[in-house]
Amino acid sequence: MGAEPQATITDIAAAMQPGWNLGNALDSTGSDETSWGNPRITEEFLNQIRAQGFNSIRIPVTWSQHQGGAPDHTIDPAYLDRVQEVVDWALDDGFYVMINVHHDSWQWVNAMPTDHDAVLDRYSDTWTQIAERFKNESPRLTFESVNEPQFAGSSGEAQELELLAELNRVFHEIVRGSGGVNATRPLVLPTLHTGSDPALLDALAAEIAALDDPNLIATVHNYGPWHFSVNIAGYTRFNAESRQSLIDQLDLVSSAFTARGVPVIIGEYGLLGFDNNIGTIEQGEKLKYFEYFGYAARQRGFTTMLWDNGQHFDRTANRWRDRALFAQISSSWTQRSGTATSDLVFVPASGGISARRLSLNPNGTSFQALLHDGAKLKAGTDYIRVGNKLTLSAALLKRLAGDRKPGPAAKLVVRYSSGVPWTLRIINQATSVLRAASGTTASFKIPTSFNGDQLATMEATYADGSNAGPASWTSYKQFDVTFSPDYAARTITLTPDFFAEVNDGRVDLTFHFWSGDTVTYTLTKTGTTVTGIP
């Protein structure tokens, strides 16, 4: 019998799917891996992550605070030992592992345009030491040259692309020249900013072709269409426009690399709004996004690595903070799930109740049943389905509304033929009430009775109709950056960042809620003093 064929780099990248990021740990810029609030990494914790179904783990590492100065830039041996300990635990778990030069990218690598030789010397010394330490590790360990490469003080993008190409060439030369397993170890090269603009993709594609090495992988990061990802300019929904924007981004990457035989790892993905709060994007819209992202990446053969700095998997309790979100993410690795136009169904807290209609999005599956508390509801009585239009009867909603006290009333589950069921939240709702407030630009909260409703976005304009506040190109302000609801405290906070770009005088606010209600509110700002009335 002949020898089994060796795995190609495409096979290796595929075997790494799906992946997870051990963010805000060894990449922390403080004194140790706990300095950004996460607990010390343990072998048992990595076992927990492996049990979630991940086949690869990206371990971002920041070296600068554990490194001496010129001429040798010696990395603290104890720190190298610690990184190796975590890497070995992950390899022993069966993970493919990726390590890199992480926040060093903006701490000192970015000075390369104005301090070229010193930066290149330090970068070379850093990778020489890493390569030497890990040169005999399992080939399931991969190296990434630098995280999110960026430069300060350059003459423009052309120079930055040249500098990144130089870093990647030096990285490649050092690792390959160090011998051992490093001679053929999979290496991961990023685009400038790990972005997906055509010029950035083309530049990296040319670099990879010039290196003529069969064990190279391209990497980009993807945090979704920007407006939707941060909830600004009224992009509260993962609508057709946002979906097409995502498709266009992924198609550019596929054309630049996959079509040329170069595998792609999306080394980080998520939504940018998660940096502030995972509730920045409404739950149903968030679920629809991750369902589609996973499908679209899988269709193009990309390996995806979820960015998690502790906001998703609770590293103390060893559980997902949002189990529904992870269910949707993990399901998308292998199949599609049906969704709907929304996961919110609002019922008036007083007055008559009428039927509610919404559209189903089967996504290639088929509708099976509508359930309440595990029991199937009756077609024709509780609901009517015509094609993908689902109408919930007035009688059903009245029954579910109960005493009609504002707030969550019930949950219905749309079960499809495969994938994750879609949950509809039935909510008793009355128009939100905002009350008068006084405060300062440093601390201003609007007392609010939300009455079961949820805030979608906020508009801010001056008396003449022009836009007020940051991002003055739109009246719709950024969620959790300029304003933030606190449903438990029953307040809406307007942030110092909002007031920093608001002129003195009158400002008209319009709060848009998910029920469809809008509520207006008027601010008066005089210096640092702010008052507000409904």
Image (spheres, rainbow, N blue to C red):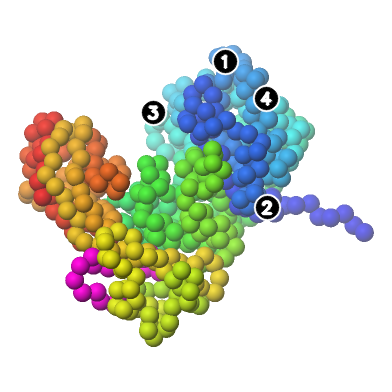
- Compare residues 400 and 143 and report the one nearer the observer: 400
Q: Find out whether the residues at labels 4 and 2 contact each other: C-beta distance under 8 Å.
A: no
Q: Secondary structure at mark 1?
A: loop
Q: How many residues crowd around disc 4 within 10 Å: few (fewer than 14), some, or many (20 or more)?
A: few
For the residues labelled 1 and 2, the Cα–Cα distance comes to 37 Å
In the rendered image, residue 361 lying in the magenta stretch gets the answer no
Residue appearing at x 54%, y 32% in the figure: 39
Q: What residue appears at the point 26 percent right and 61 percent down from the top-left corner? A: 405
Q: CA distance from mark 3 to mark 2?
A: 40 Å
The residue under the point 18% across, 43% down is 446
Q: Are marks 3 and 1 in contact (CB under 8 Å)?
A: no
Q: Which stretch did the figure color magenta?
A: 340-356
Of the image marks 1 and 2, the number of the one nearer the N terminus: 2
Query: Counting residues from the N terminus, which is met first, the one under dot 4 or under dot 2?
Result: 2
Circle 3 is placed at which residue position? 153
Above or below 366: residue 41 = above
Q: CA distance from mark 4 to mark 2?
A: 27 Å
Q: Residues within 10 Å of mark 1 (few under 14, many from 20)?
A: some
Give me the C-alpha separation between circle 3 and circle 4.
Answer: 35 Å
Q: Are marks 1 and 2 in contact (CB under 8 Å)?
A: no
Whether residue 222 sits left or right of residue 498 in the image: it is right
Q: Which kind of residue does numbered mark 3 sit on?
A: Gly
Report the Cα–Cα distance between label 1 and label 4.
16 Å
Q: Are marks 3 and 2 in contact (CB under 8 Å)?
A: no
Residue 159: give its label.
Answer: none
Per the image, the residue denoted by label 1 is 68
